[in-house]
């Protein structure tokens, strides 16, 4: 699996990946998430231009997964990581997160953070297996509080959500996540 920066022509495919990755939410009683619109092309382009959108591509250089991120309060906040179901369970998400972690380290950011559904097996329990820990409310930074407020306004608090953090060791440490 090769990881590379997203190209402008990849963006519609990323929307397709997002739609496909959302479909399994229907099976766990979250049809609203399954039906949620993917990021707009403009949103994806902003991340791409900022150098914070990476894709995992297949042997024909077609995106099968992607991650977007932004610096928030000294950490790199993973805005979205989505893997097409046909590429799932092959370590693609873990590889994308490791790529984001390396990007963060190169910029002297101390951690990866994300927000996710607490009870969906491929969300918080998956990230915990990769070494992320759930942040208690008093540990939320101002930026994470802002992100959670935006998510709440979007209706995501209909299901339990958590903020999670993975500390990034320096260059001498393992190249986590999961490593």
Image: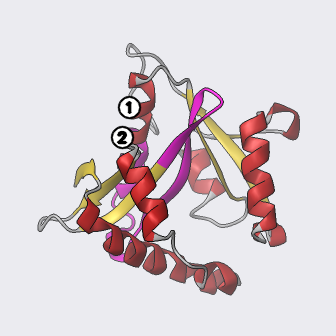
- Secondary structure under badge 1? helix
Residue that badge 1 annotates: 102
- Secondary structure under badge 2? helix
Q: Do the residues labelled 2 and 1 touch (CB within 8 Å)?
A: yes
Q: In which quarter of the image is the N terminus?
A: bottom left
Residue that badge 2 annotates: 99
The residue sitting at 73% across, 42% down in the picture is 144
Q: In this view, does 156 lie above or below 172?
A: below
**Label annotation for residue 59:** none
Residue positioned most to the top? 172
Residue 36 picture location, percent across and down? 61, 79
Residue positioned most to the left? 60
Q: Is residue 110 above or below residue 139?
A: above
Left or right of 113 on screen, residue 147:
right
> Which image quadrant is residue 155 in?
bottom right
Of residues 126 and 7, which is closer to you in this image? 7
Left or right of 177 on screen, residue 3:
left
> Which image quadrant is residue 41 in?
bottom left
Q: Give the range drawn in magenta.
A: 69-98
């Amino acid at each position: 699996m090769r990881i590379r920066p997203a190209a402008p022509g990849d963006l519609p495919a990323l929307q397709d990946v997002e739609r496909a990755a959302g479909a399994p939410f229907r099976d766990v009683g979250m049809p609203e998430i399954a039906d949620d619109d993917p990021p707009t092309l403009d949103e994806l382009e902003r991340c791409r231009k900022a150098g914070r959108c990476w894709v995992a591509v297949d042997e024909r250089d077609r995106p099968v997964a992607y991650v977007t991120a932004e610096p928030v309060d000294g950490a790199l906040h993973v805005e979205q990581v989505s893997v097409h179901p046909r590429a799932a369970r092959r370590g693609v998400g873990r590889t994308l997160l490791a790529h984001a972690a390396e990007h963060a380290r190169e910029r002297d950011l101390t951690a990866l953070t994300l927000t996710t559904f607490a009870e969906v097996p491929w969300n918080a329990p998956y990230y915990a297996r990769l070494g992320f820990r759930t942040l208690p409310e008093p540990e939320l930074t101002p930026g994470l509080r802002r992100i959670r407020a935006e998510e709440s306004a979007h209706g995501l608090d209909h299901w339990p959500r958590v903020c999670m953090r993975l500390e990034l060791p320096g260059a001498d440490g393992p190249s986590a996540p999961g490593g």
